Amino acid sequence: MKRVVLATGLVFFTAIAAAAQNQPMAMNQGQMDRLDRNKNGAVDRSEYQAFMTSAFAGLDKNKDGSLNSDEVARVLNTQQFAASDANSDGKVSQNEFLNRVMSDFKAADRGGDGSLQ
């Protein structure tokens, strides 16, 4: 479980950091392999969304349906957390989380085919 959360944190951090710098995210081959559930050599939108939905659940330690700054302190700095908190209520809901990471996915999908290779 810790490995999943750490991998999740790394993917989430990479996505948020890239977005903060207006650059597409980059994943290493190990990360790609973990997310590529059907082993076709690419991570498609549904694989990424399923992984990030699970990642959210793993990061939500108190199981209240949102992420607070303490829950993501290891993977996000204050500025990155604020950028993810779309409504500025001091927490990142699952919807805010998924909107953010899926927007990052779209930016990284250079071919526009719904997959990352």
Image (cartoon, rainbow, N blue to C red):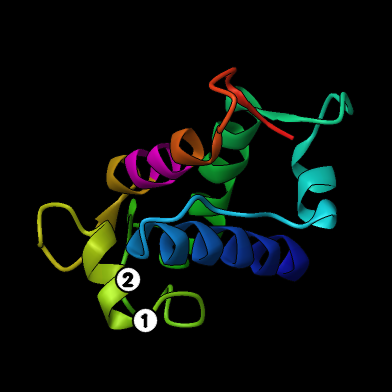
Q: Quadrant of the N terminus?
A: bottom right
Q: In the image, 74: left or right of 38?
A: left
Dot 2 surroundings within 10 Å: few (below 14), some, or many (20 or more)?
Answer: some
Instruction: Identify which residue is drawn at 59% across, 17% down.
Output: 113
| The disc label shown at residue 80, or none | 2
Residue 88 placement (x, y as % from top left): 10, 62
Are the residues tagged 1 and 2 within 8 Å (C-beta)? yes
Position of 10 with respect to 62 (left or right) is right
Kindly state the secondary structure of the residue where label 1 is placed. Answer: loop
Is 43 rendered above or below residue 64? above
Q: Which residues are magenta?
A: 98-104
Dominant secondary structure (helix, strand or loop) of the stretch shown in magenta: helix
SS at mark 2 in the image:
helix
Amino acid carrying label 1: it is: Asn
Tag 1 residue: 77
Identity of the residue drawn at 64% across and 64% down: 5
Q: Nearer the viewer, residue 51 or 19?
A: 19
Is residue 78 inside the magenta stretch? no
Residue 26 left/right relative to 36: left
Give above or below for 72 relative to 34.
below
Q: Position of residue 96 (x, y in %)?
A: 28, 46
Real-space CA distance between mark 1 and mark 2, rounded to the nearest whole angstrom: 5 Å
Type of amino acid at the residue the image marks with label 2: Gln
Quarter of the view holding residue 94: top left
Nearer-the-camera pick, 72 or 111: 111
- 116 shown above or below 55: above
